[in-house]
Image (cartoon, helix red, strand yellow):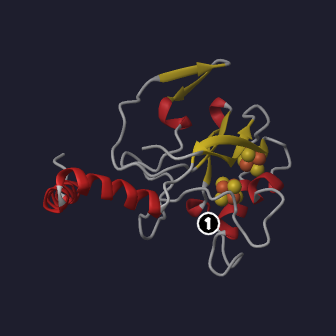
Amino acid sequence: MTGEKKKKKVKTIKIDIDKCNGCRACEVICSAFHSTPKYASNNPARSRIRIHFDPLRDIYLPVYAGEYTAAECMGRDKYTINGKEYDECDFCRASCPSRTLFKEPDSGLPLKCDMCEDDPELKEPMCVQWCLNDALTYEEHEEEVEEELKMEDVELGLKSMVDQYGWQKVIDTVARMAKRAEAPKSS
Ligand code: SF4
Ligand code: SF4
């Protein structure tokens, strides 16, 4: 059962690693903007953008936080770009169990970039505004996505299943699925 297509605004930050000099202003302003109250403190460990920082190898790689993932992946490859070697994980935006990056230091809760959502809306995210080297560029584009199912559509779907299989069968199936979803995953 699919919904209708609709346009969705997608916000991204384009990163030019050749322009980053590792000043870490983006980390400072991100953590300050998201502190409570706003600008009350700054701590790069709480920033949703982090710089992989290795001056001896001239590596300054900004990465901003993406989705939380409960499982680590198999990615352990090495990449050599312009003579500099990077781990696959260096480019990854996930808050994942294999590292402390993108986790709130006190609680361990995952951090995710929210593009500095604010009211009124900012013209550009704070890290982009504070990057004086233009290593970060804010971009927007539209993508077609399936419209989320409306509750009426869900009810219609359920009704047709009830008509076909009967109430008890549908209730038993949903209960079994919920139990499976709640069961602890074996590691
Ligand atoms: S503010 Fe810009 S130049 Fe400075 S560390 Fe962040 S991305 Fe790099
Ligand atoms: S867009 Fe905002 S929340 Fe995301 S990394 Fe930049 S400053 Fe942090």
Could you tell me which quadrant the N terminus lies in? top left
User: What's the residue type where badge 1 is placed?
Assistant: Asn
Q: Relative to 50, say whether 39 is above or below.
A: below
Residue 63, compared with residue 125, is above or below; it is above
Q: Where is residue 177 in the image (x, y as percent from the top left)?
A: 20, 54
Q: Where is residue 173 in the image (x, y as percent from the top left)?
A: 17, 55
Q: Mark 1 points at which residue?
A: 43
Horizontally, is 82 left or right of 1 in the view?
A: right
Count neighbours of disc 1 (C-alpha within 10 A) and say few if under 14, some if 14 to 19, many if 20 or more. some
- Label 1 sits on a secondary structure element that is loop
Tell me if I can see residue 22 in this picture.
no
* Image quadrant in which the C terminus is located: top left
Q: Which residue is rendered at x = 63% and y = 30% of the image?
A: 57
Q: Residue at x 46, y 50 (%)?
A: 95
Most distant residue in the front direction: 163
Q: Nearer the viewer, residue 104 or 180?
A: 180
Across the whole image, how many numbered discs are drawn on residues?
Answer: 1
Residue 36 picture location, percent across and down: 62, 79
> What residue appears at the point 83 percent right and 55 percent down from the top-left corner?
129
Could you tell me if residue 179 is visible in this image? yes
Which of the pair 14/16 is nearer the observer? 14
Name the residue at the bottom extreme.
Answer: 37
Q: Where is residue 15 in the image (x, y as percent from the top left)?
A: 72, 38
Q: Which residue is drawn at 47% across and 65% down?
A: 105
Q: Quadrant of residue 135?
A: top right
Q: Is residue 30 left or right of residue 179?
A: right
